């Protein structure tokens, strides 16, 4: 696999330079490669210009149109791994090797805090999403605990995103089919706006069954998902906006208790409710006062009923609630015509509560506990021009205090500072270098700290294994130094093309990494701290556009070790290549594309991890979207994922991934 991967890498990199302008047909040039990031600095910035690595996913793009779950949406993002296997309820996101506990997950600004060792924490269907933004690297300085690996921010649809110029009301219907899991997902979305009001409502239903794997076997699964979204925004007195939002997710399924396994199935019902109230004042003429207030409540309930075996009929429930409030403001100051400051500052509070129950007593491994976190931050974006070039300097500092306790009287309380300094320098418009130094932390979650009860039954010489709570568990603290560069060129091979390359290398020094220590012969399972760890990684992204032809290539690598023993840690990720080559034929109202994901063997693993083989996965996609005529309101998307039916496992997965799937989506707007 190593030799073939090198060949593929060379071929993919060459593809960004051999595209000739002779292939441009009659298509108008499309050289927009850059996106806008909001979450990297809390103010709109070009993803290329910010001193960090940021990825974006547009769910309206042809390559993402037939995405059925989290893995489909994110599998072509640099530095991102989705583990947990092909079942949607088990999928979790890793950024730069850090698990989802060390990644801040947001849906429209709401923290997704749900805790489970066997389930994911993101409960929303892709048909309700507009885009995803991924900030890779330490983000605790403005987002608080859990931002070691970065931030993944999901954004749902809004009326303004769906209406064409001059329209005030619309309805969109779509139906998605996927053959690998017999997925059938209809969706209806209605949206409208007036001078003061913006409303969107969306409802989808997903019915899917057993997942056909690349091995030819089937992974037992049943999903019946109802997902709804209702958003309303009211603008009054010119600059004041109030937004109400409600999201509902309900999955009546059957799968193992550990959905990242092939174990005995249980009837698993997941209900997720999210409500938020937002207020914003945005007066373009007021540079000092632009407050944003956000109050929200999330509640996730899981009921697991044993349907076979000695415990048939037993129901174990987990009720997780988050109540949170954030207050943010930005003040813009112009010191001179060449120097500006954008101050972002604010405060955050959130409370997590976990209540387990069981019809036969306690829910082993799930504590009855709660936590509270308070945080305040300030950041300054300093932009100034000099004769030697343009500088962007971003110092930031945040302080968080967290406390937690459980029903058995255990408790912990601690505070942490998260400083960061990021700098970018552009000596000429087409070239930039950047660097950052940041300290991030992650507080141990309730399950890691207070879990008790039976972990797994013994057999033979191995005794029953029990969780041991550890209220002395310390927070993970990681200091990361990153350095990178980027080029942004136009007219490379023709007068209309554009090339962007941006990459970075980083090294992290970790203190008190949290690791699960399973002592099989001692009969205990306990989360403990690894005193010292070191992580090194790099990543690079390339995008090229020439008329109708576009190409993207990304490479990444991560190596993590216990600094005291030299043993590898589960954060390590082998060299991984992603590719996307697409062609827009306007005369056919069509887009044709190929995507690939190629990974070397994952053999640098920790003691509790299993090595995985290298793999190569190819996807094809096609879109037909007439711009006029009797079919101008119809869009047809078709794709073939895992074209060659590859048999492979992703990092963090105990089961094989989905095999070849033929996918189709038909959308009609009226």
Image (tube, rainbow, N blue to C red):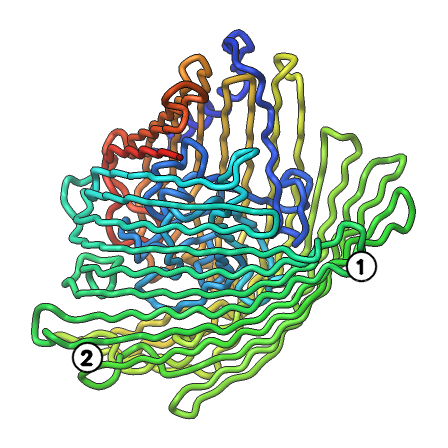
Q: Earlier in the sequence, mark 2 or mark 1?
A: 1
Q: Quadrant of the N terminus?
A: top left
Q: Quadrant of the C terminus?
A: top left
Residue placed most toward the observer, 368 or 7: 368
Residue 123 image point, x, y percent: 37, 58
Q: Residue at x 15, y 46 (%)?
A: 218
Residue 205 position (above or below residue 117): above
- What is the total number of numbered labels drawn onto the structure image? 2
Q: Determine which of the numbered discs, if any, sits on residue 224 in the image.
A: none
Residue placed most toward the observer, 641 or 480: 641
Residue 91 location, quadrant:
bottom left
Q: Is residue 96 visible?
A: no
Residue 437 position (above or below residue 525): above
Kindly identify which residue carries mark 1: 288
Residue placed most toward the observer, 445 or 476: 445
Q: Determine which of the numbered discs, if any, sits on residue 463 in the image.
A: 2
Residue 11 location, quadrant:
top left
Q: Residues within 10 Å of mark 2 (few under 14, many from 20)?
A: some
Residue 554 lies left or right of residue 92; in this view the side is: right
Q: Residues within 10 Å of mark 1 (few under 14, many from 20)?
A: some
Residue 203 image point, x, y percent: 35, 51
Q: Residue at x 41, y 60 (%)?
A: 247
């Amino acid at each position: 696999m190593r030799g073939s991967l090198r060949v593929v890498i060379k071929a993919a990199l060459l593809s960004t330079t051999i595209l000739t302008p002779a292939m441009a047909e009659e298509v108008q040039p499309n050289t927009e490669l850059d996106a806008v990031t909001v979450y990297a600095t809390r103010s709109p910035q070009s993803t290329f210009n910010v001193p960090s690595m940021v990825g974006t996913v547009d769910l309206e793009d042809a390559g993402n149109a037939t995405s059925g779950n989290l893995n489909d949406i994110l599998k072509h993002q640099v530095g991102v791994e989705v583990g947990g296997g092909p079942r949607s309820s088990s999928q979790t996101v890793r950024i730069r090797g850090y698990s989802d506990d060390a990644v801040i997950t947001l849906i429209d600004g709401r923290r997704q805090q749900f805790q489970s060792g066997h389930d994911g924490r993101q409960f929303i269907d892709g048909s309700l999403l507009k885009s995803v933004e991924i900030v890779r690297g330490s983000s605790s300085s403005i987002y608080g605990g859990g931002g070691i690996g970065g931030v993944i921010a999901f954004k749902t649809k809004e009326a303004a995103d769906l209406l064409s110029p001059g329209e005030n009301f619309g309805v969109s219907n779509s139906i998605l089919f996927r053959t690998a899991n017999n997925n059938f997902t209809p969706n209806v979305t209605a949206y409208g706006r007036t001078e003061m009001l913006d409303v969107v409502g969306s409802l989808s239903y997903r019915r899917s069954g057993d997942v056909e794997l690349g091995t030819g076997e089937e992974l037992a699964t049943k999903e019946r998902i109802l997902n709804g979204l209702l958003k309303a925004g009211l603008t009054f007195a010119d600059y004041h906006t109030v937004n109400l939002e409600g999201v509902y997710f309900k999955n009546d399924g059957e799968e193992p208790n550990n959905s990242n396994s092939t174990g005995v199935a249980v009837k698993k019902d997941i209900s997720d409710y999210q409500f938020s109230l937002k207020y914003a004042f945005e007066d373009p003429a007021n540079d000092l006062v632009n407050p944003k207030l956000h109050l929200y409540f999330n509640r996730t309930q899981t009921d697991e009923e044993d349907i076979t075996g000695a415990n048939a009929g037993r129901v174990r429930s987990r009720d997780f609630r988050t109540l949170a409030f954030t207050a943010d403001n930005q003040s813009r100051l112009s010191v001179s015509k060449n120097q500006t400051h954008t101050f972002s500052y604010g405060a955050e509070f959130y409370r997590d509560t976990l209540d387990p129950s069981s019809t036969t007593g306690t829910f082993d491994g799930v504590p009855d506990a709660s936590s509270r976190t308070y945080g305040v931050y300030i950041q300054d974006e300093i932009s100034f021009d000099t004769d030697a070039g343009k500088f962007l300097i971003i110092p930031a500092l945040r302080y968080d205090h967290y406390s937690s306790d459980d029903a058995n009287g255990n408790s912990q309380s601690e505070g942490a500072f998260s400083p960061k300094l990021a700098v970018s320098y552009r000596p000429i418009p087409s070239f930039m270098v950047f660097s950052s130094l940041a300290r991030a932390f992650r507080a141990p979650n309730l399950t890691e700290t207070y879990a008790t009860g039976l972990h797994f039954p013994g057999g033979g010489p191995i005794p029953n294994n029990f969780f041991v709570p550890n209220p002395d568990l310390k927070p993970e603290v990681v200091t990361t130094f990153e350095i990178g560069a980027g080029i942004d060129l136009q007219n490379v091979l023709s007068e209309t093309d554009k090339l962007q390359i941006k990459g970075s290398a980083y090294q992290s020094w970790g203190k008190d990494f949290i690791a699960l220590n399973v002592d099989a012969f001692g009969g205990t399972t306990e989360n403990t701290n690894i005193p010292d760890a070191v992580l090194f990684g790099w990543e690079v992204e390339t995008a090229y556009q020439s008329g109708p032809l576009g190409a993207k290539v990304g490479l990444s690598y991560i190596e993590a070790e216990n600094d005291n023993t030299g043993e590898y840690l589960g954060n390590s990720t082998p060299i991984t290549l992603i590719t996307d080559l697409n062609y827009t034929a306007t005369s056919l109202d069509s887009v044709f594309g190929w995507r690939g994901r190629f990974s070397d063997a994952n053999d640098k693993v920790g003691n509790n991890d299993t090595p995985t083989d290298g793999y190569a996965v190819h996807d094809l996609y096609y879109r037909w979207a007439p711009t006029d005529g009797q079919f101008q309101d119809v869009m047809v998307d078709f794709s073939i994922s895992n074209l060659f039916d590859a048999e492979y496992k992703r990092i963090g997965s105990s089961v094989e991934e989905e095999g070849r799937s033929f996918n189709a989506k038909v959308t009609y707007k009226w």
